[in-house]
Image (cartoon, rainbow, N blue to C red):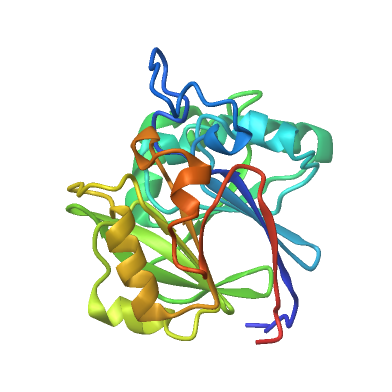
Amino acid sequence: MEDKNLNIDLTFLGTGTSTGVPVVACQCEVCTSTDEKDKRLRTSALLKIGDITIVIDCGPDFRMQMLNNAVSDIDAILFTHAHRDHIAGLDDIRGFNYILNKKVDVYATSEVFDSLNEQFPYVFNNTRYFGAPQITKNLISHHPFDVYGIEATPIKVWHHKMEVLGFRIKDFTYITDASEIPAQEMDKIKGTKIMVINALRKSHHVSHFSLEEAIDIINKVNPEEAYITHMSHFIGKHEEVEKDLPSNVFLAYDNLNIKIDGNG
């Protein structure tokens, strides 16, 4: 595996939970907020590392996320798990196929590929359906894997009783849809400088960290900076919540861009 000593350019494409924010038909103070930071598409992230562009999850808002951020090319998609709010945008990679005449590399576990096959059978048929998305399957498990010379380490977390993968690349760790991180997986996160972790709301939830639980994990890892993602409208208004967070913890918001030093 080639170790590319390059900076990571991270863009939060979406930071909302499965309903997005605002929630359809909801009139709460968050859903009616005029603050753009309270408007959240489904959770996804874009990493630019040198000349390689990686997307983590592509949910139902993927098309608009690509257009909103003027993304003209991607090299790979890493899937954390197979819930619809993380995979429903797979069909929209077709633009990259058509315009760039290329397949897109997809990295996922066998369980995720089984679900993709059920939900997008025309992508995986032996007889190619004209106009179907063109991908290259890359099967991953719990071992580090190579994405165009960049090493990615899977972090196994639990989404209630469902296994989900987070990813660590250099000093950056990304975890979503988690309610528990086993001790041996916490060891893989040690030394992380920039951490992204989910927090659905302030109160306890069976399959997602609460804000307090996420901060407890952050304190154990002790990164330089941590960003909260996958938030519902129950988290509260961005401006009000963020002012009460620890000095190194921030609520992420859609289209937020941060630079991560790759020399660590």
Expressed as whole percent of the image width and height from the top left, the position of residue 165 reads: 38, 61
Q: Residue at x 24, y 73 (%)?
A: 182
Q: Horizontal placement of 158 versus 132: left or right?
A: left
Q: Residue at x 41, y 22 (%)?
A: 23
Q: Horizontal placement of 221 versus 168: left or right?
A: left
Which of these two is toward me, 194 or 182? 194
Picture quarter with the C terminus:
bottom right
Q: Horizontal placement of 123 versus 98: left or right?
A: left
Picture quarter with the N terminus:
bottom right
Q: Residue at x 42, y 79 (%)?
A: 189
Expressed as whole percent of the image width and height from the top left, the position of residue 163 reads: 27, 57
Image height check: is 64 above or below 199?
Answer: above
Which of these two is toward me, 43 or 167? 43
Expressed as whole percent of the image width and height from the top left, the position of residue 78 reads: 53, 55
Q: How many marks?
A: 0
Expressed as whole percent of the image width and height from the top left, the position of residue 207 reads: 23, 49
Which of these two is toward me, 247 or 52? 247
Image height check: is 131 above or below 36?
Answer: above
Q: Is residue 40 visible?
A: no
Image height check: is 20 above or below 210?
Answer: above
Image height check: is 175 above or below 143?
Answer: above
Q: Is residue 200 visible?
A: yes
